[in-house]
Image: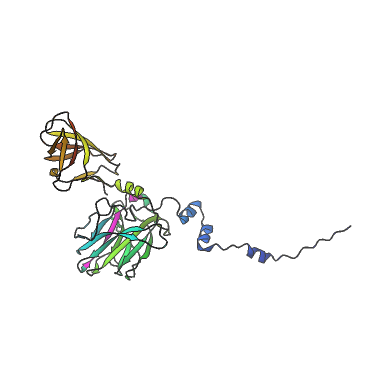
Amino acid sequence: MTVKVTKPAINVREELADLRKPSGVAGEAMLRAETPQEQFNLIGAGRRNLLINGDFSVSQRGDFTTASSSVNGAYFVDRWFTDKGNVAFNKEQTTGIDLDGTPAISKGVKLTATASGTSYMGIRQKIENPTQYVGRIFTYSGFVKSNSPKARLASFISGTSQTVLGNTHSGNGQWEKLSVTFTITGNPSTAWYADAFIISDTFDVTPISSGDYIEVTMLQLEVGKVATPFEHRSYGEELALCQRYYEVLYADSEAAANVSAFTTTAAYGHMKMQPKRAAPTMLVSAATTFRVRSAGNNLNLTSIGFDDPTATGNVRVNCTTSGLVAGDSGWLSRTSNGTAYIHADAEL
């Protein structure tokens, strides 16, 4: 018996069209990527942000609330320092910034001019070991709020004077996400800065009025051509990154270090700190703000010093006073005379 089987005709063109699944712009970019590394960069996998404390959550040097400043190049919120021309300003750490689509409620920094003039005003972070990035493409992005149409993000490399200026803020007083993409050229051996400024289109002075401000949050500098969502790190991780450059070892609490009396006038001890990028400079309040407490006595210091601070995290503290008993132990603490502090500074 003969069996005849029939099959409907197939429109090959229509069948192929059905196989085309919508992928969107991002999907098309993934399909066009030539290497796994390109795809890795497109999805923003792994650690991305070269900037430390880009959400301004760490402020070891203190709380800044409309603090008046006329000092140029002064660090305040960790890893960020001010840069200005001849205009005075207030600087503050702002809180409670809650923007749609961002990973967490964030902090920021705000500079407000307190006088008018032809100047510039902003913050910057210096990037460590910039020569390793020569030839790489970077995108610098972040949220900016300002009442000045000259507020912007910028990248500046001194020495080779490579300046990259991003688009300006509209000046409408609302949060706007700004970004700029560029390639590192030349030899940035001197310094590379990530900036947020009110500044001219030629990276120079511009008219600034009293009350003009720039506020920024969630700044990110990353390899690639795309500004990916801000990489939110935990406070503990961000603090550890900051302490590689600057650390508050003692800030007006009770015990700064254990010490032992070597003679009747000299006591020595060791202080432990987090590893630093280089041997730090020790910053200390006046000796009169410290005392050695030993054998029931409170002995005010006449001098305090530090020997051989190292990048690995060790330093010896030397205390000079009177009335010690050689061999006795004790501890270094504050007096009631002013504010006592010991900081380790290894900033770039």
Q: Could one spot residue 282 in this view of the protein?
A: yes
> How many marks overall?
0
Residue 125 located within the stretch drawn in magenta: yes
The colour scheme is rainbow
**Of the pair 32 and 56, the residue shown nearer to us:** 56
User: 184 left or right of 115?
Assistant: right
Q: Could one spot residue 120 in this view of the protein?
A: no
Percent of width and height locating residue 74: 22, 55
Percent of width and height locating residue 202: 29, 66
Q: Residue furthest top?
A: 327
User: 248 left or right of 101?
Assistant: left
Percent of width and height locating residue 214: 29, 64
Which image quarter: residue 194? Answer: bottom left
Residue 132 located within the stretch drawn in magenta: no
Q: What quarter of the picture does the N terminus occupy?
A: bottom right
- Rendered view: 251 above or below 224: above
Q: Residue furthest right?
A: 1
User: 214 left or right of 303?
Assistant: right
**Of the pair 303 and 20, the residue shown nearer to us:** 303
Q: Residue at x 17, y 30 (%)?
A: 328
Q: Residue furthest front?
A: 296
Q: Residue at x 35, y 47 (%)?
A: 236
User: 43 left or right of 73?
Assistant: right
- Rendered view: 215 above or below 44: below
The segment highlighted magenta reads: 118-131
Which image quarter: residue 179? Answer: bottom left
Percent of width and height locating residue 344: 24, 45
